[in-house]
Amino acid sequence: DAGITQSPRHKVTETGTPVTLRCHQTENHRYMYWYRQDPGHGLRLIHYSYGVKDTDKGEVSDGYSVSRSKTEDFLLTLESATSSQTSVYFCAISGQLKRGGYTFGSGTRLTVV
Amino acid sequence: KNQVEQSPQSLIILEGKNCTLQCNYTVSPFSNLRWYKQDTGRGPVSLTIMTFSENTKSNGRYTATLDADTKQSSLHITASQLSDSASYICVVSEGDYGGATNKLIFGTGTLLAVQP
């Protein structure tokens, strides 16, 4: 998707290992978000950022941490991956206060074995 | 509890036919309602965004309607194409204005398959 890239696209990791997913944007948008998508559930917000070093929790933040040291990068870290964190992770960006238009990345498929 | 429910869960139609997808929500306060298209292995892409005062919005062959009184929305696809095969997700923004920090409530989507 134009202006937003996620890496890696796929990852398999072992239970208990740390994992970091990266979201990079070239749109200079203020707001960045991490969501997870699981079968039978709508996308659920993990964490979001409203500026450099400004982050807040979403509805499913347990087991996850984030960092944003630059406007363009938003990192999601699983400190000790568990099988319940097997999911597809999406990053999104938004620059509009009004109407809040979102642009989503292509996702990272994470498998914890 | 704020919820967004979509129906049907899945749908198969023949190329060239029309179809309508439904979305019912119980979100308050309501800010806006969005429809997204998600192709397999890709992120959602916005089709339409409607606020309380808008009851219809079109984007090419896609037309969304909103009835804020009954808290229902529909997405109508006209003259379907094979490329319309995707998941269609209804999303309601909770909040008093369309802010970027409003909570988004996502439906689980309708999986549409268009067959030749």
Image (spheres, rainbow, N blue to C red):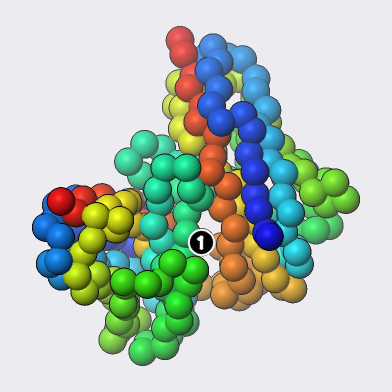
x, y percent for residue B37:
50, 41
Asked if one can make out residue A24 in the rendered structure from this viewpoint, the answer is no
Q: Dot 1 corresponds to which residue?
A: A102
Asked if one can make out residue B3 in the rendered structure from this viewpoint, the answer is yes
Q: Residues within 10 Å of mark 1 (few under 14, many from 20)?
A: some
Q: Quarter of the image for the N terminus of chain B: give it.
A: bottom right
Numbered disc 1: what chain? A
Left or right, residue B79 beside residue A68: right
Q: Is residue A28 above or below residue A102?
A: below
The residue drawn where x is 65% and y is 49% is: B4
x, y percent for residue B3:
65, 53
The residue drawn where x is 76% and y is 67% is: B29
Left or right, residue B106 beside residue B18: left
Q: Quarter of the image for the C terminus of chain B: give it.
A: top left
x, y percent for residue A27:
39, 70
Residue B53, quarter of picture: bottom right
Q: In this view, does A86 lie above or below B61?
A: below
Q: How many marks?
A: 1
Choose between B81 and B6: the one closer to the eye. Answer: B6
x, y percent for residue A79:
21, 74
**For the residue marked with disc 1, what is the amino acid?**
Tyr
The residue drawn where x is 61% and y is 20% is: B79
Left or right, residue B7 beside residue B96: left
In the current view of this chain or complex, which residue is farthest to the right? B69
Helix, strand or loop at label 1? It is loop
The residue drawn where x is 68% and y is 59% is: B2
Q: Is residue B11 above or below residue A104?
A: above
In the current view of this chain or complex, which residue is farthest to the bottom? A53
Q: In this view, does A30 lie above or below A111?
A: below
